[in-house]
């Protein structure tokens, strides 16, 4: 009995199994040691993440290679069985296969990378991880206004890149155009208001224009896109109720909300300092017809 067990333990199949386990354990240990070394010695967060991901992929490849070499003789007779099984798995795991294809498209096609701000379908956030099956986002929006995190981490199947539009806020051009629309009362000095808004825009966001212009030149060389103005511009439209000024400017993709707040603060300061030459308008309702039994007076109500 003891001889039979000993013979079984040292048979060819068991030798291959023991060898495989030893090799896999050694590779796993080396990968763990490498990740620890990267975590303790690489200070740059982006570089550390990429090195850990590359080490993980190399570890999987290194574990698959010895298994294929050791068991290559036994795999030859399984071709037919694996063919039928593969067809069944392909049908049952079509979403998984589509996600793997999406991962390949994301990696090779440059859809986005870790650190980018994206919107996939209706979900917006910063990419914090890209796996073979899912992309992980730190979500923005929902019950939180503006480009701010709401605290939820969202995992999206990579197959969605084939089904939903993918918006990248900073892929090839890390700036956004934004606008502020200001209603100004008729009777104000419109040329004074125009000059004030231009000065405020140049002071607050003018520094973004130079970097945005250089990035746009690179974009023009890469894509079929026309040149665009990146310096701030103020335009005026006369409406039925007020003069509408629009301040259009370029801002870094992560500074949109804070920049808009700085602009509004400067604009309100200019309104207070203008001595009445710059006044913001509000909706006004005028009653121009009253019943015959009422005094025929023209009244107005201002909604603030």
Image (spheres, rainbow, N blue to C red):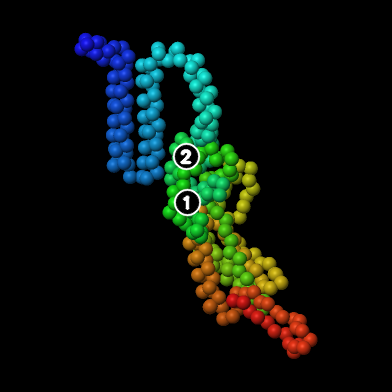
Q: Residue at x 51, y 19 (%)?
A: 83
The x and y percentages for residue 43 are 33, 45
- The answer to which quarter of the image holds residue 59 is top left
256 lies above or below 275 = above
Q: Secondary structure at mark 1?
A: strand
Image coords of residue 281 (percent x, y): 62, 75
Categorize mark 1 by other alpha carbons within 10 Å: few (<14), some (14-19), many (20+). many
The answer, for residue 104, to whether it is visible in the render is no
Q: Which residue is mark 1?
A: 139
* Residue 299 percent across, percent down from the top left: 70, 84
Which residue is at the far left?
2
Viewed as shown, does residue 27 lie left or right of 97?
left
Query: Dividing the image into 4 quarters, which one contains the C terminus?
Result: bottom right
Establish if 147 lies above or below 261: above
Query: Which residue has dot 2 on it?
Result: 134
Mark 2 element type:
strand
Give the spatial CA distance, label 1 vs label 2. Answer: 15 Å
Up the image or down, 139 lies above or below 265; here it is above
Q: Residues within 10 Å of mark 2 (few under 14, many from 20)?
A: many
- Residue at image coords 54%, 64%: 202
Q: Residue at x 36, y 25 (%)?
A: 63
Assess whether mark 2 and mark 1 are in contact (beta carbons under 8 angstroms).
no
Residue at screen point 40% across, 44% down: 46
The N terminus, quarter of image:
top left
For residue 187, which numbered disc appears in the image?
Answer: none
């Amino acid at each position: 009995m003891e001889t039979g067990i000993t013979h079984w333990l040292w048979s060819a199949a068991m030798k291959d199994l023991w060898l495989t386990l030893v090799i896999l354990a050694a590779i796993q240990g080396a990968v763990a040691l490498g990740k620890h070394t990267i975590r303790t010695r690489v200070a740059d967060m982006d570089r550390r993440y990429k090195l850990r991901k590359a080490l993980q992929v190399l570890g999987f490849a290194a574990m698959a290679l010895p298994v294929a070499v050791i068991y290559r003789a036994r795999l030859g007779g399984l071709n037919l069985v694996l063919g039928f099984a593969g067809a069944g798995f392909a049908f049952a795991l079509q979403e998984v296969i589509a996600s793997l294809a999406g991962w390949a498209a994301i990696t090779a096609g440059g859809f986005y990378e870790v650190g980018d701000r994206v919107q996939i379908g209706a979900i917006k956030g910063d990419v914090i991880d890209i796996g073979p099956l899912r992309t992980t986002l730190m979500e923005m929006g929902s019950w939180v206004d503006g480009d701010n995190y709401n605290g939820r981490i969202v995992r999206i199947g990579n197959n969605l890149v084939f089904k939903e539009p993918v918006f990248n806020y900073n892929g090839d051009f890390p700036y956004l155009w934004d606008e502020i629309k200001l209603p100004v009362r008729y009777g104000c000095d419109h040329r004074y208001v125009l000059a004030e808004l231009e000065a405020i825009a140049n002071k607050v966001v003018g520094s973004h224009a130079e970097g945005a212009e250089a990035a746009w030149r690179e974009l023009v060389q890469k894509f079929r896109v026309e040149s665009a103005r990146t310096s701030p511009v103020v335009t005026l439209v006369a409406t039925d109720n007020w003069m509408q000024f629009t301040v259009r400017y370029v801002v870094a993709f992560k500074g949109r909300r804070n920049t808009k707040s700085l602009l509004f603060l400067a604009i309100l300061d200019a309104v207070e300092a203008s001595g009445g030459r710059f006044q913001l308008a509000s909706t006004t309702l005028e009653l121009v017809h009253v019943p015959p039994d009422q005094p025929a007076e023209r009244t107005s109500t201002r909604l603030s």
